[in-house]
């Protein structure tokens, strides 16, 4: 046993206490810096126990629970983050067929109830069909357990205009919202009609501005849906599509297209009422109607962008040309039969060919109008 230990044992066995001066010397030998470090470590441990964090590896940096204004029961820290997309549509104008675009004025809200998503990260969004868009941020709000960021959207968006059914064409004008950074495994863009929307929500009533107008177009439908876009190589992103469906007012078609061309066809058919020997008057009337029909189609084509397929109006003018061409042929055949001395046969040819000309135009046009209805 070392000498120091023998000395202490001897003191204890004799019933005496160690000298107080020696014990004080032992406490003074502990460095003050070590005591300070121990105090700081104890304080940090207390803070960590009072403010736990919810970690989301691979998604977004975790934040203290106290930093987010949301009830503790609304969020599970598993699965993808869900963001609700809400759109208020104030105005749609300047629907440009040739450019394939339209102008929009809307308010966009992104809402979520997941503590893994911060307000700064929630401001990240991309309008996938944008051409020229400006977004003005209204700011961040935490209310009723929802974190919300709001933007005012102005600009031009792209749309796919299929004119095969012109002038009875119906078009969808979409606004596609997608997160530019997080794939579908980490974040889901959810339509309010499919996820936690208010009860009794009516998009036509509740999501169109009070001054919403479409000019020459009429509103057919308004819809919102969620979908997943696959970019290949395993890159899949969630998207929400808010869209309105618009159609043309058919009154302009009846007044500007159908009525003039039908009048020209009737003018060509009137050649059958002219006596068979007046070949010059018959041809003058039918050829004049044919030339006016060509001019009418030229004017109608200027209202549309150049396309590589036939529209309903193109088919209508095609049937009109066939009817007028048959009227010209009828005048010639009728006159030849009359010049050979067979007036009765000439009249029969005139009546049958005039009826055939009328059927060639009016029957398919009527079928197209009924099919549209």
Image: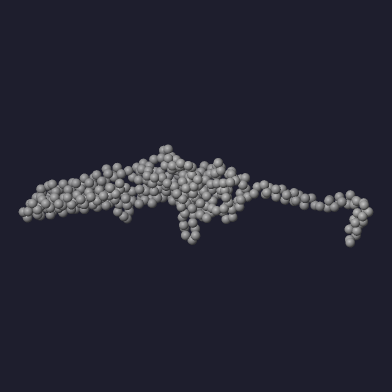
Residue at the far top in the pictured view = 210
Q: Is residue 217 above or below residue 332?
A: above
Q: Looking at the figure, which quarter contains the N terminus?
A: bottom right
Q: Which quadrant of the view contains residue 263? A: top left
Q: Is residue 102 above or below residue 234?
A: above
Q: Residue at x 55, y 46 (%)?
A: 113
Is residue 13 visible to the viewer in this orientation of the structure? yes
Residue at the far left in the pictured view = 341
Is residue 302 visible to the viewer in this orientation of the structure? no
Q: How is the image coloured?
A: one colour
Q: Residue 122 placed where, x, y %?
A: 54, 48
Q: Residue at x 51, y 43 (%)?
A: 150
Q: Residue 285 placed where, x, y %?
A: 16, 48
Q: Nearer the viewer, residue 202 or 280?
A: 202
Q: Nearer the viewer, residue 274 or 81?
A: 81
Q: Residue at x 80, y 52 (%)?
A: 31
Question: Left or right: where does residue 49 sit relative to residue 173?
Answer: right
Residue at the far right in the pictured view = 14
Q: Residue 50 placed where, x, y %?
A: 67, 47
Q: Is residue 152 above or below residue 26?
A: above
Q: Which quadrant of the view contains residue 213? A: top left
Q: Nearer the viewer, residue 111 or 140?
A: 111
The number of numbered badges drawn on the structure is: 0
Q: Residue 92 placed where, x, y %?
A: 40, 43
Q: Residue at x 42, y 42 (%)?
A: 204
């Amino acid at each position: 046993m070392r000498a120091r230990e023998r000395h202490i044992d001897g003191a204890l066995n004799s019933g005496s206490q160690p000298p107080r001066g020696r014990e004080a010397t032992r406490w003074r030998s502990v460095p003050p810096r070590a005591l300070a470090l121990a105090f700081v470590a104890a304080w940090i441990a207390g803070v960590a126990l009072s403010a736990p964090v919810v970690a989301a590896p691979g998604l977004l940096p975790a934040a203290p629970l106290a930093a987010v204004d949301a009830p503790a029961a609304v969020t599970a820290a598993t699965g993808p983050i869900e963001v609700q997309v809400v759109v208020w549509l104030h105005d749609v104008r300047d629907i440009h067929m040739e450019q394939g675009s339209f102008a929009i004025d809307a308010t966009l809200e992104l809402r979520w109830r997941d503590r893994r998503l911060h307000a700064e990260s929630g401001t990240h969004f991309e309008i996938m069909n944008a051409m020229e868009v400006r977004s003005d941020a209204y700011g961040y709000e935490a209310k009723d357990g929802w974190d919300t960021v709001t933007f005012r959207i102005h600009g031009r968006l792209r749309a796919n205009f299929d004119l095969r059914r012109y002038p009875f064409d119906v078009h969808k004008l979409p606004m596609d919202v997608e997160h530019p950074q997080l794939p579908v495994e980490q974040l889901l863009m959810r339509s309010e009609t499919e996820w936690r929307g208010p009860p009794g929500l009516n998009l036509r009533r509740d999501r169109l501005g009070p001054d919403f107008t479409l000019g020459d177009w009429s509103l057919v439908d308004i819809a919102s849906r969620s979908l997943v876009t696959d970019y290949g190589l395993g890159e899949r992103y969630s998207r929400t599509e808010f869209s309105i469906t618009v159609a043309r007012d058919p009154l302009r078609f009846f007044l500007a297209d159908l009525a003039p061309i039908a009048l020209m066809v009737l003018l060509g058919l009137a050649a059958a009422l002219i006596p068979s020997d007046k070949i010059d008057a018959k041809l003058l009337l039918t050829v004049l109607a044919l030339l006016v029909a060509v001019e009418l189609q030229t004017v109608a084509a200027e209202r549309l962008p150049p396309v590589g397929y036939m529209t309903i109006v193109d088919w209508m003018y095609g049937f009109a040309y066939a009817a007028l061409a048959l009227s010209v042929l009828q005048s010639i055949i009728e006159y030849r039969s009359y010049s050979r001395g067979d007036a009765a046969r000439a009249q029969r040819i005139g009546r049958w060919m005039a009826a055939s000309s009328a059927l060639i135009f009016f029957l398919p046009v009527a079928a197209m109008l009924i099919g549209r209805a």
